[in-house]
Image: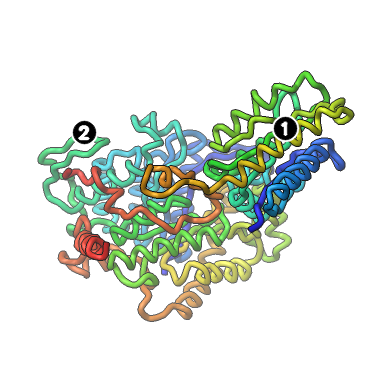
């Protein structure tokens, strides 16, 4: 069964160095997954194309536009995520944050994520650990240890591709190890499995009203 | 079937001339809309409840009582009554009193309210929203149905030997709707008590509304109140009309583009596609509205939002006139034509509830209690 990895890229120009970095990460991850004898489908989400829909979502209190609904479901169904942003004023771009603000808070729980950023200067390199990592920690995603930061000058250095290979290997290993929760009954690990949801559908399972009323009926 | 208008009571600057109505003007305008609604043959007027600017609607029963005195037939309702931050004891008293004043022309729609600071202002915590809605509503049902209430819950001072006065008119509590956009717990609550479920509808895509209403219908049947298609469903709608679509869009567009809820965001055209908003001729509004029943099933109440975004009073009055004289008569006939005989046309009214007698399930605090216990016992046997 082919693994699904989604690449979210927030570059604003065409072509963009953010997308260039995203392409290299996707390629390296594909190589690492297939080297382990598994197939992978990489799906790109170019946030630039949904900038208008994200603005609509924000100013209407969350009206689900058709394309955004698809993307939210795509992310919640992904087995791995590569998130790449340009660095603006010392942090991820507003467009990048808008997309993650539009996700359900449970849509990435337990999901392996590779974080990356492209910037004009190496002096922004802590953006990965000061901005991106806390964001994905809040979303309870599993961020791989190696983050990829690429300043303009890195595109001419060898070190970048070595780091990309290392990060891709870490992501591939995590994506392929998912689902190993051991034998049921020996520990409460099955119950602890993160429950993911895109938030785009009404949950069919409803809490029976007797449970909701318990302790609130005024007599007990 | 019942048709009406509902208002959120916002004071908003008219973007075409920069004029902002005073609170007095806005309140007076809302009264005029209610009177107009009765005059043009609409059935229901519902007022929102808010406790923060730019809204004026902090005291619904005062306003509805004033309207009751000037109308004869109009049903007075809410959109919504804050079941979370209001004291259920005061709701029980106020709305029973309004029943007496209006001759029973009252029902209510419960809502939680989504303005964060209102909760602490009234001594509550928004994170308890669902629990507050469950506990407070249960107490409200008791206050309207038990002559003497002893109560101890999580959120309110306990009651010992309390009698809510006046008792509901003719010993018959008003019918209640529960409004929720996203919370399945509230659809479940409405289904459990056999109450109505209202979906605001106007800020969401139809697929979402359809799923929420289906959930409520399925659970209504589950609790033994009737078949799923007999459950009581209400929907919101939003329209602006003129003799041509182009003219309707020309007049409404500046209001849409600057509206507090969705202004400066999607285009009028995109929003009309994503939500039930219809800006066009009365015929277009009729066609769109009739389509609602295709995805929620035959339903009992359709409310329209007509007065918001700074629309001037004269324009809103014209819109209500068109709604009452050109749109609703056709909707009534067409909705009845497609409705199967076993599906009720109207939600319960004071008259129908009185006619059903004191032994009807409506008079029980928990009409589905026995059914729920039976289902739980069955589930235990199966397990």
Please say if A160 is above or below A59: above
B147 relative to B2 in the view: left or right? left
The disc at residue B106 is none
Is the image coloured rainbow, by chain, by secondary structure, or in one colour?
A: rainbow
User: At numbered mark 1, what does the secondary structure look like: helix, strand or loop?
Assistant: loop
Q: In this view, does B171 lie to the left or right of B30?
A: left
Question: x, y (%) of residue A145?
Answer: 64, 30
In contact (CB < 8 Å): disc 2 and disc 1: no
Q: How far apart are marks 2 and 1 (CA)?
A: 50 Å
Q: Give the camera-side residue of A129 and B72.
A: A129
Which label is found at residue A93? 1
- Quadrant location of residue B77? bottom left
Residue B157 is situated, as x and y percent measured from the top left of the image, at 21, 33
- Provide residue B259's location: percent of width, then percent of height: 62, 44
Residue B310 in sight here? no
Disc 2, SS? loop
Compared across the picture, whether B378 is left or right of B133 comes to left
Residues B378 and B77: in front is B378
Q: Which residue lies furthest to the right in this view?
A: A156
> Which residue in the structure is indicated by mark 2?
B157
Chain for numbered disc 1: A
Quadrant of the drawing holding the N terminus of chain B: bottom left
**In this rendering, the label closer to the viewer, 2 or 1:** 1
Quadrant (top left/top right/bottom left/bottom right) for the C terminus of chain B: bottom left
Do dots 2 and 1 share one subunit? Answer: no
């Amino acid at each position: 069964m082919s693994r699904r990895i989604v690449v979210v890229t927030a570059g604003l120009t065409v072509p963009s160095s953010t997308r260039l970095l995203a392409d290299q990460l996707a390629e390296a991850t594909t190589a690492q997954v297939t080297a382990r004898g598994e197939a992978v489908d990489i799906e790109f989400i170019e946030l630039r194309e949904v900038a208008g829909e994200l603005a609509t979502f924000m100013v209407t209190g969350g009206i689900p536009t058709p394309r955004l609904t698809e993307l939210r479901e795509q992310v919640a169904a992904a087995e791995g995520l590569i998130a790449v942003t340009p660095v603006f004023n010392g942090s991820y771009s507003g467009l990048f944050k808008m997309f993650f603000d539009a996700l359900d808070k449970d849509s990435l729980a337990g999901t392996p994520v590779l974080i990356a950023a492209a910037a004009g200067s190496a002096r922004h390199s802590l953006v990965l650990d000061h901005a991106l990592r806390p964001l994905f920690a809040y979303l309870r995603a599993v961020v791989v240890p190696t983050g990829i930061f690429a300043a303009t000058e890195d595109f001419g250095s060898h070190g970048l591709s070595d780091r990309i290979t290392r990060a891709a290997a870490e992501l591939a290993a995590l994506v392929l190890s998912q689902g190993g929760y051991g034998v049921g009954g020996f520990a409460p690990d099955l119950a602890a499995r993160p429950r993911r949801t895109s938030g785009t559908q009404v949950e069919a399972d409803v809490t029976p009203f007797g449970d909701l009323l318990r302790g609130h009926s005024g007599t007990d | 079937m019942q048709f009406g208008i509902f208002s959120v009571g916002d004071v908003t600057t008219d973007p075409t001339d920069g004029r902002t109505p005073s609170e007095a003007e806005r309140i007076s305008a809302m009264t005029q809309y209610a009177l107009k609604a009765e005059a043009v043959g609409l059935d229901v007027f519902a007022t929102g409840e808010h406790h923060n600017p730019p809204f004026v609607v902090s005291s619904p029963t005062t306003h509805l009582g004033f309207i009751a005195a000037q109308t004869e037939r109009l049903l007075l309702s809410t959109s919504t009554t804050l079941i979370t931050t209001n004291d259920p004891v005061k709701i029980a008293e106020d709305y029973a009193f309004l029943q007496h004043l209006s001759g029973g022309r009252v029902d209510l729609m419960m809502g939680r309210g989504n303005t964060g600071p209102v909760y602490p202002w009234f001594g509550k915590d928004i994170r308890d929203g669902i629990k507050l809605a469950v506990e407070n509503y249960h107490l409200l049902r008791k206050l309207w149905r038990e002559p003497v209430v002893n109560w101890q819950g999580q959120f309110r001072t306990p009651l010992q030997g309390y009698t809510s006065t006046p008792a509901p008119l003719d010993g018959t509590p008003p019918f209640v709707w529960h409004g929720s956009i996203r919370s399945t717990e509230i659809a479940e609550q409405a289904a459990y008590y056999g109450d109505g479920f209202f979906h605001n509808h106007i800020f969401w895509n139809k697929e979402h509304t359809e799923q929420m209403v289906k959930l409520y219908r399925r659970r209504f049947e589950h609790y033994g109140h009737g078949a799923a298609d007999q459950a009581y469903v209400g929907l919101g709608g939003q329209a602006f009309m003129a003799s041509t679509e182009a003219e309707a869009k020309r007049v409404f567009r500046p209001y849409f583009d600057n509206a507090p809820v969705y202004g400066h965001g999607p285009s009028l055209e995109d929003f009309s596609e994503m939500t039930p908003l219809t800006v066009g001729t009365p015929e277009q509004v009729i066609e769109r509205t009739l389509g609602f029943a295709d995805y929620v099933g035959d339903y009992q109440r359709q409310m329209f939002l007509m007065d918001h975004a700074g629309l001037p009073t004269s324009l809103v009055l014209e819109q209500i006139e068109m709604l009452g004289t050109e749109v609703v008569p056709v909707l009534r006939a067409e909705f009845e034509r497609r409705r199967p005989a076993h599906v009720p046309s109207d939600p319960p009214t004071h008259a129908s509830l009185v006619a059903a007698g004191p032994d009807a399930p409506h008079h029980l605090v928990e009409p589905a209690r026995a059914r729920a216990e039976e289902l739980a016992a069955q589930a235990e046997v199966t397990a």
